[in-house]
């Protein structure tokens, strides 16, 4: 699954990689958690290029009785996203990119404890998680736009910590993923393929990240440097 991630790259780099204007309020985030606003890239309606928008993490389907369901729909399994009622409409028409610098997973240890790890690309550049977005009408309160992140089977690196990982899209697939038409079979097959393990790296981080209120560089700092006082 994907339950926490980071995005702290400079705004200009985000604009370059994702081909969209970036909001001036794009501040560094080191511990993005469910139900919080997340920066997402999607195509503008009726053309006009890409836009960077803020969506609530945890997809709220149009038929939902309340916004609370979103906390249970932070991830969508790539293998079943096309048929699950909560996701199938968004999968066909409302796909987005979720920029990230890395994501966290927790390994089970003895005594019921869990050790957090931060996963990132070897070149340390930001990448796109495959996302879906949806609009929920909140009555007199207006509407809520929300998103979910797709997951797939873990590659060799992530598998030692967790059986699943977020879907990371290669840049050459960004345009096809953002298109408003249903995804093609070749795109679907690529989405179901875990990102190459040899292009990723990971390190242990401190328990500071466990609290979503903590949001600073200590969250993804190597545990060894923290223990050494670095």
Image: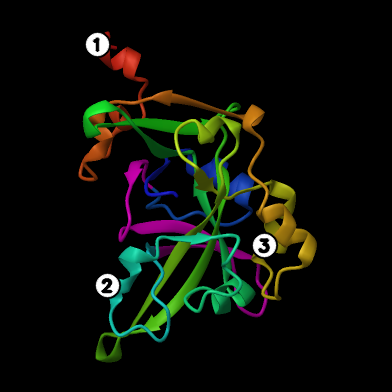
Q: Nearer the viewer, residue 32 or 39?
A: 32
User: Left or right: 40 with respect to 205?
Assistant: right
User: Left or right: 121 with respect to 74?
Assistant: right
Eye-nearest disc, 2 or 3? 2
Q: Name the residue under label 3.
A: 177
For residue 61: magenta? no
State the CA–CA distance, disc 1 to disc 3.
Answer: 43 Å
Q: Residue 85 at what x, y percent from top left?
A: 50, 79
Depicted 189 relative to depicted 225: above or below: below
What span is colored magenta in the figure? 27-55
Q: Is mark 2 on a helix, strand or loop?
A: helix
Give the number of marks: 3
Q: How crowded is mark 2: few (under 14 residues within 10 Å), some or many (20 or more)?
A: few
Depicted 17 relative to depicted 93: above or below: above
Q: How crowded is mark 1: few (under 14 residues within 10 Å), some or many (20 or more)?
A: few
Q: Residue 88 at what x, y percent from top left?
A: 56, 76
Q: How crowded is mark 3: few (under 14 residues within 10 Å), some or many (20 or more)?
A: many
Q: Which mark is residue 68?
A: 2
**Quarter of the figure with the C terminus:** top left
Lower position in the chain sequence, tag 2 or tag 3: 2
State the CA–CA distance, disc 2 to disc 1.
Answer: 41 Å
Q: Is mark 3 on a helix, strand or loop?
A: helix
């Amino acid at each position: 699954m994907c339950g926490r991630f980071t995005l702290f790259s400079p705004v200009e780099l985000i604009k370059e990689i994702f081909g969209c204007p970036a909001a001036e309020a794009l501040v560094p985030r080191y511990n993005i958690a469910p139900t919080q606003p997340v920066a997402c890239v999607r195509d503008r309606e009726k053309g006009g290029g890409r836009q960077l928008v803020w969506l609530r993490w945890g997809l709220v389907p149009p038929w939902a009785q309340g916004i609370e369901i979103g906390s249970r729909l932070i991830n969508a399994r790539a293998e079943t996203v096309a048929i699950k009622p909560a996701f199938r409409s968004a999968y066909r028409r409302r796909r987005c990119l979720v920029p990230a610098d890395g994501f966290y997973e927790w390994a089970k240890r003895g005594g019921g404890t869990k050790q957090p790890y931060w996963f990132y690309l070897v070149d340390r550049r930001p990448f796109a998680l495959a996302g879906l977005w949806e609009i929920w009408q909140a009555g007199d309160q207006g509407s809520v736009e929300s998103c979910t992140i797709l997951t797939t089977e873990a590659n060799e690196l992530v598998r030692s910590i967790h059986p699943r990982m977020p879907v990371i899209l290669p840049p050459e697939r960004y345009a096809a993923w953002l298109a408003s038409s249903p995804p093609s079979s070749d795109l679907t097959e690529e989405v179901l393929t875990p990102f190459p393990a040899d292009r990723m790296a990971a390190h242990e981080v401190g328990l500071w990240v466990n609290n979503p209120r903590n949001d600073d560089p200590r969250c993804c700092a190597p545990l060894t440097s923290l223990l050494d006082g670095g």
